Image (cartoon, rainbow, N blue to C red):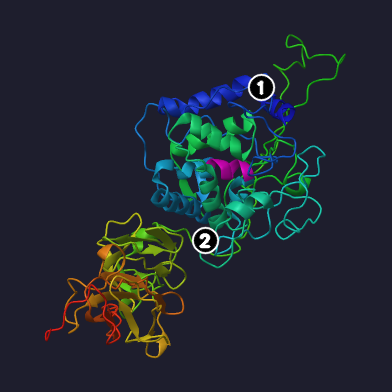
């Protein structure tokens, strides 16, 4: 790669000097931390960074280190350094600064979406534009359909180890049509294995398509922000670009376009962008030479060829020399207009971001948002993004946020979620699941990048209920003082005759009247007379052992559940049976003993 790049640069002047001059000119008015690093003239395509070494298989990069366009932006940037920025009108300005409308919209939408979900990354859309320029010439000059999908697949060379990395097939040919080896795919040139991890459905058409500029730009932005990178920090920015293609010259080329686009840009109709030709492998897509750009300047009259060695040179002092010879007039060659490619569809350049078009968020979901503890809500907050005329707005990022003292969460355990509106302008929040806390909470829906009042949904979590409690089998409960009730107690909870799992049942050992907790008599362990137990998946609770206590009498085991379910079980505590004292045996009559007392008559 580096050898070719050097040959290309020598066409203009010198190899490393041109790159350095271009980068310096483009970065002259930028902040110091955004200045591109110096060109690595000693190591060619050697990657930089601590511990960064390009693996031979191409792993560790989004593109598998596929070829890329190597042309640099012109030195005359859209706004020259030192002058105040000039706002360029639409469809005007330097041709190289023009970005096709759908491609520009995709980059800006990706920046907006990722800044709402990962604000610490500080992703600028101009970085996506710089990568899109060197990877595919902005989707081949914006040759995309109304949904942003390229009119034909953009495929890199076969990664079979011949001049490139060797990456065996990972997608069964689903994206690149090759069942033996992988190829980089789409306007952002993802290899299938990387797309499998980072692929996105940014245009809400139900597909993650690497050939769709909206899907690919969103995936590229998330890939660049990986590992908690902050792209406002130069070191993180360099690492992000090198993770895309591990080449120093690739880094410098992307940085050149990044700085160029930061100085100013404008949109052009789809299909009319300037298409670069020079690639790091000296070939175009599918390893075929690329055609010249439709907007390339027409060739002028060729300069006269130098005279052959040994041919006599005209002498100005002699007749017939240049001073006396007048060439016959020639008919001027009319200027050749560049070929005009008829548009495949009317250009639809978005004049404003979709979020700006939104006038209000209309509530779509109806009915109360309720659920019992530890269960899923049957409905989710849903809104429609509408413009001032009431028409739906597609492609708007809607942020849903759970607020209040609740442990309810979206699926996946998050309290926030960002959803993009589809063709009907509708965005539905992910499924909600209630936790253990009961009570009300709110879900707020806002338009990302639009200063509008939030649309608020009120939701409530209630306790699970049971309208009936009944003891499951068992004999009457009785015990003597100082012992333990030997019978086990199990109670079943039902609601509308169905088993009621997860219901909190309050158990109280009350006095004989069953009106209040007993002050003495039976108890659970450690003198506890009130418990709260939760029914299992079969709607059952099993009571712990009950101690009879020291006071005999009648008591009541009272159980109650939310929803009206209740039951009472009688507890009987008896005193132990008294053991009779032994009776002395009578003495036989007429057989007194010397010690016997005299009879009363003696």
The outermost residue toward the right is: 310
Image position of 402 with respect to 481: above or below: above
Label 2: few (<14), some (14–19) or many (≥20) C-alpha neighbours in 10 Å: some
Count of picture labels: 2
Above/below status of 553 relative to 134: below
C-alpha distance separating marks 1 and 2: 39 Å
Asked if marks 1 and 2 touch (Cβ < 8 Å), the reply is no
For residue 579, above or below residue 28 = below
**Residue segment shown in magenta:** 130-135
Taking the image as drawn, is residue 340 in sight? no
Write down the residue under mark 2: 347
Is 261 on the left or on the right of 478, as rendered? right
Tell which tag, 1 or 2, sits nearer the viewer: 1
Which badge, 1 or 2, comes first in the chain's sequence? Answer: 1
Residue in view at x 63 percent, y 44 percent: 62
- Picture quarter with the C terminus: bottom left
Residue shown at the point (34%, 70%) measured from the top left: 386
Residue 131 is one of the magenta-drawn residues: yes
Residue 15: mark: 1
Specify whether 401 is left or right of 225: left
Magenta segment's dominant SS is helix
Query: Can residue 373 be spotted in the picture?
Result: yes
Mark 1, residues whose alpha carbon is within 10 Å: few (<14), some, or many (≥20)? some
Q: 224 or 212: nearer the eye?
A: 224
Task: Point out residue 286 in the picture as x, y percentages from the top left corner.
Answer: 76, 49
Q: What element carries label 2?
A: loop
């Amino acid at each position: 790669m580096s050898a070719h790049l050097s040959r290309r640069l020598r066409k203009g002047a010198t190899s490393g000097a041109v790159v350095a001059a271009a980068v310096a000119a483009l970065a002259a008015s930028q902040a110091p931390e955004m200045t591109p690093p110096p060109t690595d003239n000693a190591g060619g395509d050697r990657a930089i960074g601590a511990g960064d070494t390009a693996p031979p298989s191409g792993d560790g990069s989004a593109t598998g280190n596929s070829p890329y366009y190597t042309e640099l932006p012109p030195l005359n940037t859209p706004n020259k350094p030192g002058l105040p920025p000039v706002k360029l009108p639409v469809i005007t300005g330097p041709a190289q600064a023009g970005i096709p409308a759908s491609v520009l919209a995709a980059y800006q939408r990706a920046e907006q979406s990722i800044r709402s979900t990962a604000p610490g990354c500080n992703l600028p859309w101009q970085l996506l534009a710089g990568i899109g320029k060197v990877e595919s010439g902005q989707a081949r000059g914006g040759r995309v359909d109304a949904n942003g999908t390229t009119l034909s697949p953009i495929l890199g060379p076969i990664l079979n180890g011949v001049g490139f990395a060797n990456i065996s097939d990972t997608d069964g040919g689903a994206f690149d049509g090759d069942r033996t080896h992988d190829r980089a795919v789409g306007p952002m040139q993802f290899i299938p294995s990387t797309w499998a991890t980072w692929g996105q459905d940014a245009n809400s058409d139900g597909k993650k398509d690497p050939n769709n500029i909206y899907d690919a730009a969103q995936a590229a932005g998330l890939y660049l922000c990986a590992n908690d990178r902050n792209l406002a920090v130069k070191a993180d920015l360099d690492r992000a670009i090198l993770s895309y293609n591990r080449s120093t010259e690739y880094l410098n080329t992307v940085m050149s376009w990044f700085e160029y686009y930061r100085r100013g840009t404008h949109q052009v109709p789809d299909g009319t962008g300037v298409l670069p030709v020079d690639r790091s492998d000296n070939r175009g897509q599918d390893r075929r030479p690329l055609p010249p750009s439709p907007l390339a300047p027409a060739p002028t009259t060729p300069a006269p060829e130098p005279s052959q060695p040994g041919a006599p040179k005209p002498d100005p002092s002699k007749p017939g020399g240049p001073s006396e010879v007048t060439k016959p007039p020639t008919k001027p060659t009319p200027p050749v207009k560049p070929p005009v490619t008829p548009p495949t569809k009317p250009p639809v350049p978005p004049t404003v971001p979709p979020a700006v078009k939104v006038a209000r968020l209309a509530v779509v979901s109806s009915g109360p948002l309720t659920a019992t503890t530890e269960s899923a809500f049957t409905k989710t907050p849903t809104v429609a993004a509408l413009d001032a005329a009431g028409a739906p707005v597609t492609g708007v990022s809607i942020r849903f946020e759970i607020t209040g003292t609740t442990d309810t969460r979206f699926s996946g355990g998050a309290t926030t979620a960002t959803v993009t509106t589809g063709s009907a302008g509708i965005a539905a929040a992910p499924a909600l699941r209630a936790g253990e806390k009961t009570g009300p909470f709110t879900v707020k829906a806002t338009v990302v990048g639009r200063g509008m009042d939030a649309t608020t949904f009120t939701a409530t979590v209630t306790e699970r209920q049971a309208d009936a409690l009944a003891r499951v089998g068992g004999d009457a409960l009785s015990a003597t003082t100082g012992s333990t009730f030997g019978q086990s107690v199990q109670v079943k909870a039902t609601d509308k005759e169905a088993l009621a799992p997860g219901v909190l049942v309050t158990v109280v050992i009350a006095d004989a009247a069953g009106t209040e907790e007993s002050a003495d008599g039976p108890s659970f362990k450690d003198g506890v007379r009130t418990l709260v137990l939760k029914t299992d998946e079969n709607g059952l609770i099993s009571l712990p052992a009950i101690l009879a206590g020291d006071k005999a009498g009648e008591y009541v085991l009272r159980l109650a559940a939310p929803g009206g379910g209740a039951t009472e079980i009688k507890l009987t505590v008896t005193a132990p049976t008294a053991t009779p004292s032994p009776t002395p045996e009578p003495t036989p009559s007429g057989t007194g003993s010397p010690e016997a007392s005299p009879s009363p008559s003696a």
